């Protein structure tokens, strides 16, 4: 990882990207960030931090299983909308976690990272909810099918974002 002399955008945009993933699927942001961190040398800034757990390979593996469960659960008819308070709160916490961890790893402020992550996840939650609903209504397609497309997009963008951080 680079030193804290990085430009602000070097922390902001990746944190926002991982948070946006969390807004779509709550476990995806932490899973992809964990995958990235576990393939790198532990950033010195994370060494003494409780957030270092995201850099452990076992955590990334466990989170991948949770993503699979979330992909299935998302399509069940009795699953609440992602914008209900409990779901929105989980996504905000997930976004705050990835934002704080990424900012800390890159020598930035935990609080700034958590705020960027939480706000990014909440914005992405509403955006993806209404986008999915609109596509489903306008195209007269079942929301589950649109959700499957969203899953594919989350996987592709998550892999791309993780890979881009390694550069």
Image (cartoon, grey):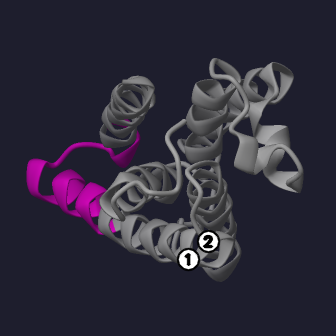
Left or right relative to 77: residue 45: right
Which residue is found at the position 68% from the left and 60% from the top?
A: 97
- From the image, state whether disc 2 or disc 1 is nearer to you: 2
Which residue is found at the position 67% from the left and 33% from the top?
A: 34
For disc 1, the marked residue is: 112
Q: Nearer the viewer, residue 146 or 27?
A: 27
In the structure shown, which secondary structural element does the residue marked by tag 2 occupy?
loop
Identify the mark at residue 109; answer none if there is no mark. Answer: 2
Is residue 72 at all visible to an observer of this figure?
no
Mark 2–mark 1 CB contact (< 8 Å): yes
Spot occupied by residue 162 in the image (x, y as percentages of width and height): 45, 29
Left or right relative to 165: residue 134: left
* Magenta: main secondary structure: helix
Which residue is found at the position 48% from the left and 59% from the top?
A: 23
Quadrant of the rendered image containing residue 28: top right
Is residue 41 at all visible to an observer of this figure?
yes
Q: Residues within 10 Å of mark 1 (few under 14, many from 20)?
A: some
- Quadrant of the drawing holding the N terminus: top right
Quadrant of the rendered image containing residue 155: top left
Spot occupied by residue 44 in the image (x, y as percentages of width and height): 73, 42
The CA span between labels 2 and 1 is 5 Å
Q: Is 46 rendered above or below residue 115?
A: above
In the structure shown, which secondary structural element does the residue marked by tag 1 occupy?
helix
Q: Is 145 rendered above or below residue 6?
A: above
- Per the image, is 131 magenta? yes
Q: Nearer the viewer, residue 116 or 82?
A: 116
Left or right relative to 74: residue 62: right
Spot occupied by residue 145 in the image (x, y as percentages of width and height): 34, 35
Magenta part of the chain: 130-145
- Per the image, is 139 magenta? yes
């Amino acid at each position: 990882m680079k030193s804290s002399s990085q430009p602000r955008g070097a922390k902001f945009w990746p944190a926002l990207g991982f948070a946006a993933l969390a807004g779509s699927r709550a476990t995806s942001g932490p899973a992809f960030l964990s995958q990235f961190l576990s393939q790198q040398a532990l950033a010195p800034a994370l060494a003494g931090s409780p957030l270092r757990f995201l850099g452990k390979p076992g955590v990334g593996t466990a989170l991948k299983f949770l993503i699979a469960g979330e992909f299935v659960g998302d399509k069940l008819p009795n699953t609440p909308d992602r914008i209900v308070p409990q779901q929105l709160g989980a996504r905000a916490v997930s976004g705050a976690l990835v934002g704080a961890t990424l900012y800390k790893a890159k020598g930035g402020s935990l609080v700034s990272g958590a705020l960027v992550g939480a706000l990014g996840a909440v914005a992405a939650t509403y955006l993806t909810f209404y986008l999915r609903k609109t596509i489903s209504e306008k195209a007269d397609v079942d929301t589950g099918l649109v959700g499957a497309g969203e899953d594919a997009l989350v996987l592709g963008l998550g892999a791309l974002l993780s890979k881009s951080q390694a550069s």
